[in-house]
Amino acid sequence: MLSAKMEDYLKTIYELQGRSDDPVSTSSVAERLGVTAPTATSMIETLAERGLVEREKYKGARLTREGETVAIEVVRHHRLLETYLAEQLGYDWTEVHDEADRLEHHISEEFERRVDEKLGEPEVDPHGDPIPNDRLEPVDESSGETLSEHAEGDEVVVERVRDRDAEELAYLSEAGVTPGTRLVVEEVAPIDMITVCLPDGEPVSLPGEIAEAIRVSSAEAGGSGEPSEVEG
Amino acid sequence: MLSAKMEDYLKTIYELQGRSDDPVSTSSVAERLGVTAPTATSMIETLAERGLVEREKYKGARLTREGETVAIEVVRHHRLLETYLAEQLGYDWTEVHDEADRLEHHISEEFERRVDEKLGEPEVDPHGDPIPNDRLEPVDESSGETLSEHAEGDEVVVERVRDRDAEELAYLSEAGVTPGTRLVVEEVAPIDMITVCLPDGEPVSLPGEIAEAIRVSSAEAGGSGEPSEVEG
DNA sequence: TTTTTAATTTAGATGCGTCTAAACCAGTGC
DNA sequence: GCACTGGTTTAGACGCATCTAAATTAAAAA
Ligand SMILES: [Mn+2]
Ligand SMILES: [Mn+2]
Ligand SMILES: [Mn+2]
Ligand SMILES: [Mn+2]
């Protein structure tokens, strides 16, 4: 069996890996988890011994197929829990992350199954993140583009908003930038700042770092700003 | 902060303590938790240093007021979770214990509050165990009598059934002995065995050890075997 | 009262996850 | 091509929760 800590390391490597093929650096893992570099080195070595990551000294780590499956399982737990907390227990979507981040390691497969069933096998969580299916097949974690890649005049629909920072999320939620919202890019300032227009005409300015955390799809002309349905 | 393990020790001492004033023995704690006696000794000492138990060497341990409050909080979590799993997620009442036993240590106060609210502030869990209120006031863990204390001819209503052993619970459930069931004691055999009659006339024989795990109240004549309401 | 026995505690060790301090690469700049 | 520098790993340590083996104590038996 794997400890909750091991699961957290695997999930972190999974998140940092993205669709890139480069190994993930020790320091980035350490920073993300709030531990020192030696701690990360030692845990990554343990995971390598267990065949969950491939590691090359001084280069970094990459998930093996098996490690990826574990990570996807944890991510599935996380996103199902977030969805459940929001839909069934009335949590605000800006508040579900921390609770899910703990519980994800402690629920049984039975619990996962029943929650999935009760929710009607949802495909995305409250932040727009895709929920891996029960066969734990890889999901596309970087569909669409980030808001920061867009130019003035572009019309887009918010697909996903990074859920890691509750403050950030609360701010965006308050400003009206939530999954499904239609935005028009009004200004891309040279000082790493982007201003977008909400459906009601209200402008919102966002620093580049935040704009990178918002994933969008291009809006077809005439779109209304309704939540976009996942097809299939 | 207290670890999940510490919480388990406190809960165990709480359960073993009952309404008795005697200290709980090291070995009983060790046995209940599936650890060796030295392990229990050392953990109990740690808890004593933290002011959560009173301990006298070679005598045993007793919860302090503070330790009791922690234990009651864990018990509240446990029973709320059991109720939630049964009522909202469709678990059978014989299957909720293990899941609750893990999750009880990892839910937030917010989660507890929302679950309590969603369930309408229930007073008993699926096994008939009382759920401590949110002020964590002590509850009567040994109301009524055990079935084993009763004599031939007595008419009783099942109030609580011990939830620790899933097999035992499944057997009783199958046999029809569940909280709210009206029973008539048919025979008290000298070989530590009791036979009771269900409302439908079906007889069920139970070894003394099991009969001690079933708490009952005396049925007023004419009672129908409906679940007895908690008053107030 | 003395001896025996059973429970309890002490002693010493292990694995996990973490730390700080020190040694060590690997790529960059001169 | 060689020294610098920043990220990485090694070394050594600690606290927690656990174990086995040995010593101790309290209670029961003789
Ligand atoms: Mn986590
Ligand atoms: Mn999410
Ligand atoms: Mn527990
Ligand atoms: Mn119960």
Image (spheres, coloured by chain):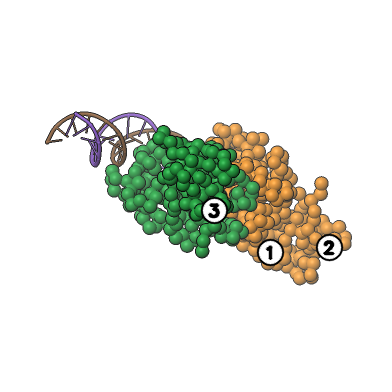
Chain colours: A orange, B green, C brown, D purple
Query: With D13 as the anchor, is A57 left or right in this view?
Result: right
* Local crowd size for mark 1, using a 10 Å CA cut-off: few (<14), some (14–19), many (≥20): some
Callout 2: chain: A
Q: Are marks 3 and 2 in contact (CB under 8 Å)?
A: no
**Distance between the alpha carbons at the discs numbered 3 and 1:** 56 Å
For disc 3, does the CB lie below 8 Å from ligand 4?
no
Residue marked by disc 3: B223
A128 vs D3, nearest the viewer = A128
Name the residue carrying label 1: A173
Which quadrant, please, contains the N terminus of chain B? bottom left
Residue A224: give its label: 2
Amino acid at circle 1 = Ser
Image coordinates for residue A139, horizontal then vertical, percent: 72, 44
| Secondary-structure class at tag 3 | loop
**Image point 28% across, 43% down: which residue?**
B58
Whether residue A161 is visible, yes or no, is: yes
Is the CB–ligand 2 distance for label 2 below 8 Å? no
Mark 3 or 2: in front is: 3
Circle 1 chain: A
Res. A31 visible in picture: no
Question: Which chain's residue wears label 3?
Answer: B
Q: Position of residue B200 (x, y in %)?
A: 59, 43
Q: Secondary structure at mark 2?
A: loop
- State whether residue B158 is above or below residue B191: below
- Cα gap from disc 2 to disc 1, whole angstroms: 19 Å
Q: Secondary structure at mark 1?
A: helix
- Residue kind at label 3, given as amino acid type: Gly
Counting every numbered tag in the picture gives 3
What's the amino acid at mark 2? Answer: Ser
At 70% from the left and 47% from the top, the residue drawn is A117
- Residue at image x 52%, y 46%? B183
